[in-house]
Image: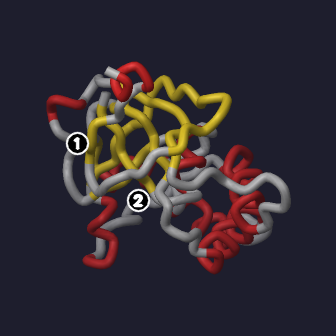
């Protein structure tokens, strides 16, 4: 099975159902569309200023027109995202897993990022050079969170996830 390493808190947001798309500057490989992959949380340190900004934006989304627009630009489901972002911001005894597989998802047919943003209320969310990483949204379908993370070093791009049976063989 293939795995995709994703920085935290984004990996946990996918597994929680708060992030229905993984955005990339390129289409998912045709051979992986419709296939189940492992969502692997990277070892990279969480960018706390980014998490705090996201948390505040989503928390305050109902207060003003500006906050509603900012929240829509995230393409996140706020009610599911806020608990994950709170854990990333102030983990206490329950930090987000790092350098571990945390669940699986099926990659759906990639969609244009502009179309997805429009569904979230932002018709031109990624129409600038700085947002080219969001040209393609890969639907994360039939997400299955794992009860416990499985520690594993990751890699850039797609890589082969080995089950315990495959490691022993």
Q: Count neighbours of disc 2 (C-alpha within 10 A) and say few if under 14, some if 14 to 19, many if 20 or more.
A: some
On residue 123, which mark appears?
Answer: 2
User: What residue is disc 1 on?
Assistant: 28
Q: Depth check: give the residue in front, 160 or 31.
A: 160
Q: Secondary structure at mark 1?
A: loop
On screen, residue 39 versus residue 72, left or right, reads left
Q: Residue at x 60, y 29 (%)?
A: 146
Which of 90 and 118 lies nearest the eye of the viewer? Answer: 90
Q: Is residue 60 left or right of residue 114?
A: right
Label count reads: 2
Q: Earlier in the sequence, mark 1 or mark 2?
A: 1
Outermost residue to the front: 168
Protein image colouring: secondary structure
Asked whether residue 116 appears in the rendered view, the answer is yes
In percent of width and height, residue 109 lies at: 27, 32
Is disc 1 surrounded by few (<14), some (14 to 19) or many (20+) residues within 10 Å? many
Quarter residue 102 falls in: top right
Circle 1/circle 2 CB separation < 8 Å: no
Q: Residue at x 45, y 40 (%)?
A: 39
Q: Position of residue 92 (x, y in %)?
A: 84, 61
Q: Position of residue 8 (x, y in %)?
A: 55, 59
């Amino acid at each position: 099975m293939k795995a995709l390493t994703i920085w935290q808190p984004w990996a946990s947001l996918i597994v929680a159902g708060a992030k229905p798309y993984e955005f990339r500057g390129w289409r998912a490989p045709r051979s992986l569309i419709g296939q189940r992959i492992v969502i692997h949380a990277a070892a990279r340190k969480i960018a706390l200023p980014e998490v705090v900004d996201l948390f505040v934006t989503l928390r305050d989304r109902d207060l003003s027109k500006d906050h509603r627009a900012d929240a829509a630009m995230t393409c996140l489901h706020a009610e599911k995202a806020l608990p994950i972002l709170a854990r990333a911001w102030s983990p206490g005894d329950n930090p987000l897993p790092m350098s571990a597989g945390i669940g699986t998802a099926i990659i759906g047919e990639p969609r244009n990022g502009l179309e997805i943003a429009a569904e979230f209320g932002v018709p031109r969310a990624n129409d600038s050079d700085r947002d080219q990483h969001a040209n393609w949204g890969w639907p994360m379908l039939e997400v299955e969170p794992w009860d416990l993370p499985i520690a594993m070093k990751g890699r850039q791009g797609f890589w082969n996830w080995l089950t315990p049976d495959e490691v022993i063989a």
